[in-house]
Image (cartoon, rainbow, N blue to C red):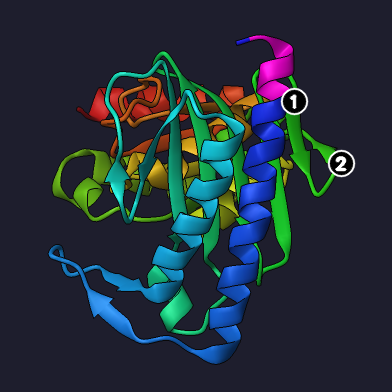
Amino acid sequence: MSELDLSKALDAAREAAEAAGVVLRHYWRKGVAVELKSDDTPVTAADREAELTIREILQKALPQASIYGEEFGRDDNNHDLLWLVDPLDGTKSFVRRTPFFSTQIALMHRGELVLGVSSAPVYGETMWASQGGGAWFDGDPARVADTREMAKASLSTGNVKTLTRDARWNALGAMIRDSNRIRGYGDFCHYHLLARGSLDLVIESDVNILDVAALAVIVREAGGVFTDLDGQAPTLDTTSVLAGTPAIHALALERFATAR
């Protein structure tokens, strides 16, 4: 994609995220009924309405792109450009009245993630990034920390159920013992903290690519490294995350690889 095209796409993604935020804040104030999907995860009218709002803006701005959304699936399999949309990542938080939910919008070009917008409308912050354009936190440049030693690193874990089933769980325990501190910020929050230098490593073993695609671009453009737990770049099939400063990511990856 040309720089002009990417800039236009990023503008559209930011506009779509802002419009979705209007929808989410409306239902946050009003309240909303909760249904269960076939996999027993919750869904609300807020999820669906926000995704329809996003789709309308993205389709108008980039009609040559397909859209893969959390609530309405993928509309076409043949385009080089693919929007990845989670209109309300953190529905469980939303329905339990905690502000750790967000809108996630990313663009993939021929299998490579090239831009991302992460907007947390009630929490009150937005980050975005595009390939070669850096990462931005509410309009200011964002950069990961320069942490190089595990003893000085701050770690955050999210969904780690699968990780408990093999030897990597012990490796994580050792990293926690060796680190400076451990937290569990979860959802968008620990990726935002990582990208702006307030955290050094994020570990998750149970995610959907729609949850993290935008965040992958943001962390990468902020100077961090974002892979799965095996060190592979994110794809549509990604289900785990190891994201961090370059040095701490390398140390963690080596420990997990040895444990396997």
The correct choice, above or below, for 10 with respect to 27 in the image is above
Q: Residue under label 2, please give it.
A: 140
Quadrant in which the C terminus appears: top left
Q: Residue furthest right?
A: 140
Residue 25 position by quadrant: bottom right
* Kind of element beneath mark 2: strand
Q: Which residues are magenta?
A: 2-7
Residue 85 seen in the current view: yes
Determine crowd level at label 2: few under 14, some 14-19, many 20+ residues with C-alpha closer than 10 A. Answer: few
Residue 51 versus residue 234: which sits nearer the camera? 51
Number of labels in the image equals 2
Residue 7 x %, y %? 73, 25
The earlier-in-sequence mark between 2 and 1 is 1
Determine crowd level at label 1: few under 14, some 14-19, many 20+ residues with C-alpha closer than 10 A. Answer: some
Residue 218, disc? none
Residue 54 x %, y %? 53, 51
Quadrant in which the N terminus appears: top right
> Which secondary structure is most common in the magenta stretch?
helix
